[in-house]
Image (cartoon, rainbow, N blue to C red):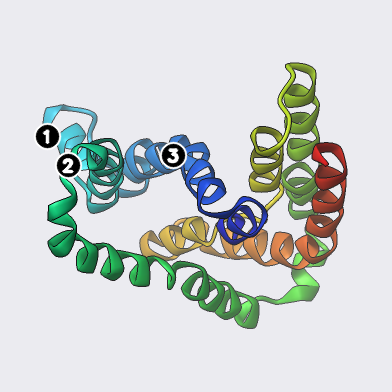
């Protein structure tokens, strides 16, 4: 959910920086996290299987392309522009599809049971308040301003990613807890995200 906010605040450059900021999370989730979900043995074969899953390959190819595209001659754009348009169109489906997944989780969740779970409240407070606040203080103290402060704070203030719930459901590992965390943080973010946006925009203005 953080990508649309980054793009709305700072355009395509903001979207790219948000992707770079989120890269360690993606690498961790689809390497170590994926290995834990699939119970891959940490031998040569297991590590190879983990590092060659489609998401890791896509991340690597995407950043290699970004680095190399400046060396591509302008004459090649006739061929490459349609390819770029395809990927741009596909990437625009990312947020709507994640909203569909989150909506399905909201529909299946028992809100009453979620509200009575202390660990869900604790997690939501850390995810939506404590972590963004720490990010804001640390970046401000080291002199970060403008988008270098705003985007990390906005990204960390987003609710729990639906990807975790999808993986938990796929591998049947605490899927109810994952759905509860995603549901509750998504609901509360309707109140907390605007507050963080107002605060950050006032600081970087």
Sequence order check: which comes first, mark 2 or mark 3? 3
* Residue 4 vertical placement versus 201 (above, below): below
Rendered residue at 77%/32% (across/down): 136
Residue position marked by numbered label 1 in the rendering: 45
The quadrant where residue 31 appears: top left
The quadrant where residue 80 appears: bottom left
Q: Secondary structure at mark 3?
A: helix
Sequence order check: which comes first, mark 3 or mark 1? 3
**Whole-Å distance between the Cαs marked 2 and 1?**
6 Å
Are the residues flagged by discs 2 and 1 in contact, CB closer than 8 Å?
yes
Q: Nearer the viewer, mark 2 or mark 3?
A: 3
Picture quarter with the C terminus? top right
* Residue 31 vertical placement versus 79 (above, below): above
**Mark 1 neighbour class, 10 Å CA radius: few under 14, some 14 to 19, many 20 or more:** few
Residue position marked by numbered label 2 in the rendering: 49
Between 156 and 17, the one nearer to me in the picture: 17
Q: Position of residue 29 (x, y in %)?
A: 42, 43
Q: Residue furthest front?
A: 75
**Mark 3 neighbour class, 10 Å CA radius: few under 14, some 14 to 19, many 20 or more:** some
**Mark 2 neighbour class, 10 Å CA radius: few under 14, some 14 to 19, many 20 or more:** some
Q: Position of residue 10 (x, y in %)?
A: 62, 50
Q: Which mark is residue 185?
A: none
Picture quarter with the N terminus? bottom right
* Residue 160 vertical placement versus 19 (above, below): below
Rendered residue at 64%/77% (across/down): 106
Q: Residue furthest bottom?
A: 107
Q: Secondary structure at mark 1?
A: helix
Q: Is residue 111 left or right of residue 159?
A: right
Q: Position of residue 169 (x, y in %)?
A: 44, 65
Q: Which mark is residue 23?
A: 3
């Amino acid at each position: 959910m953080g990508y649309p906010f980054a793009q709305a605040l700072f355009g395509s450059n903001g979207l790219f920086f948000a992707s770079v900021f989120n890269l360690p999370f993606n690498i961790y989730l689809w390497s170590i996290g994926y290995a834990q979900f699939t119970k891959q043995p940490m031998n040569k074969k297991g590590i190879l299987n983990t590092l060659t899953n489609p998401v890791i390959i896509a991340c690597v190819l995407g950043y290699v392309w970004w680095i190399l595209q400046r060396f591509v001659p302008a004459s090649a754009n006739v061929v490459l522009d349609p390819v770029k348009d395809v990927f741009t169109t596909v990437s625009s489906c990312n947020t709507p599809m994640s909203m569909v997944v989150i909506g399905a989780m909201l529909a299946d969740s028992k809100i009453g049971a979620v509200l009575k779970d202390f660990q869900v409240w604790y997690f939501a407070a850390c995810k939506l308040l404590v972590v963004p606040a720490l990010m804001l203080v640390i970046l401000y103290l080291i002199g970060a301003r403008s988008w270098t402060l705003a985007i990390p704070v906005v990204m960390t203030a987003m609710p729990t990613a639906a990807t975790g719930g999808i993986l938990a459901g796929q591998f049947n590992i605490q899927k109810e807890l994952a759905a509860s965390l995603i549901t509750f943080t998504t609901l509360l973010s309707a109140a907390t995200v605007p507050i963080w946006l107002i605060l950050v925009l006032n600081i970087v203005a």
